[in-house]
Image: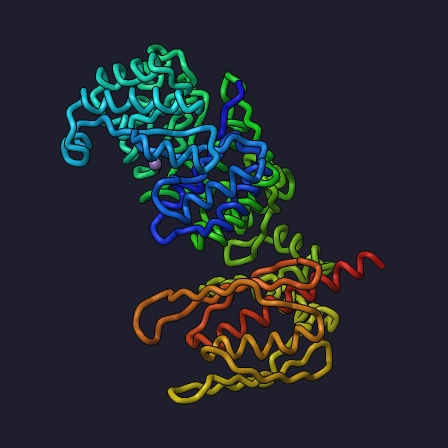
Amino acid sequence: MKVRIFDTTLRDGEQTIGVSFSPDQKLSIAKKLDALGVDAIEAGFPVISDGEFQGVKMITAEGLSCEIVGLTRTIKTDIDAAVDAGLNSIHTFIATSDIHLEHKLQMTRDQALEKAIEAVEYGKSCGLQVEFSAEDATRTDREFLKKVFGEVAKAGADRVNIPDTVGYCTPEYMAELTRDTVDITKLPVSVHCHNDFGLAVANALSGIHAGASCAHVTINGIGERAGNASLEELSMALQCLPYDQKYETNIKSELIYDTSRYVSKIAGIIVQPNKAIVGDNAFGHESGIHTHGVLNNPLTYEPISPALVGRKRRLKVGKHAGIHGMNAILAEFGVKPNEEQSKQILDKVKVLGDQGKQISDVELLSIASEVLGDKGIKRIVQLIGFSVSTGIGTMPYAFVKLNIDGKEFSGTDHGVGPVDASLNAIQKITGKISEIRIKDYALASISGGSTALCEVTISVEDGHGNRVSAKSVGEDIVTTSVQAVIDGINHIMLKKMLKEKQVS
Ligand code: MN
């Protein structure tokens, strides 16, 4: 069965606290979603602001291949704004639960029903495709909900949607409501599930299993409060889980990771590392037992291949590491220690791991080079001098001296603060040599107090678009930042060197 994917990243997703897209950003995300293969994009709520109206209009004018939908209340001016924005399709809603009727709309059930019917009829008279949502459906009196859906179907709605507005539904009840709605309307039914109890995807799957043909989802699960059902989780669950019934979507799964990164960057919402499918650790292995298993046969500890969603497996070493995983990482860099050397390297890794340290690939290579005595894989870039000055009434200024592959380079630069000045000075040097640029920088405090440890995560990109990230933990924000960047540069240069070796 084909399941329709209705993406509301640009509407419900934009209602995430701290997220606001400009019209240009909306358009750029819409193009990404279209390429990903979503069936419909909810582009926005045209009546709420000029910018929103412009954003929706730009998207409808773009001629994308998916359906473009706009949100409206059951109010004529809202629907008129949708038509003016070039939309052929609307998603119109009114709340039907007693809580919302009494405390928000101050309406009776009958009044709400009347508004719903009017809006559907008006939308149809404007020549629009109309999807009707009974807001807070899952907390609405079950018989009244049936009545509302039955009446809007008679009024000409093309589709109806069951929103679990506050994520209060169980998978079992979502199945029951879906069956009710399919029975009474005989229309295509959508489910719109929120994640307040972490059940958004489970509820959406349950609705689909009970006869719904469409799910409202967002990239990375962003949305009001705890967010919406996530597109990547729902579409991959439909495609991969062992249902008796075979489900398909039009999603090009290999574009999922790229789309997730893109939306995360524009929305400024970081994806949690343990997020299914798209989190940093979703295809990462550190424990020796798991790494050994995956290297023998990926199916042992990976339910799906990372390549299916446009990703790569990520192996890390740490205190749980084993010989096989560690050697697999070293082999990626062309380093092949013998059995005794492997043991020595692993011992050193475990000592660092027991101290609570993160061991980057570069650190692993540098440990390996100590053990192997191989000069060729020593750090390519070494920090040999560094000073920074900052204060009030003076512009932050940094001096950096690096040794790159045996040659010394120094650079100085200003910045808005000491970290910015240091990173600018480093970029001045590396920019000349290998076009390495710092793309992302994130700073987090690990514990409290003025002696707290800080964690710096950066990503650097070379002139060919190769990107690596590196992380450093330390007590001093500035030196930790510099160390993270140097690690990142080492990593990317090592990768490049290795590629060149393989080519030649
Ligand atoms: Mn919602």
Image quadrant in which you'd find residue 476: bottom left
In the rendered view, does 374 fall on the left or right side of 267?
right
Give the camera-side residue of 503 and 166: 166
Is residue 294 among what the camera can see? yes
Give the camera-side residue of 46 and 395: 46
In the rendered view, does 19 fall on the left or right side of 319?
left
In the rendered view, does 405 fall on the left or right side of 33?
right
| Image location (x, y in percent) of residue 385 | 58, 85
Is residue 179 among what the camera can see? no
Residue at left 35%, top 29%? 92
| Image location (x, y in percent) of residue 138 | 27, 26
| Image location (x, y in percent) of residue 263 | 50, 48
Give the camera-side residue of 187 and 120: 120
Image quadrant in which you'd find residue 53: top left
Residue at left 37%, top 28%? 203
Residue at left 40%, top 51%? 20
Image quadrant in which you'd find residue 470: bottom right
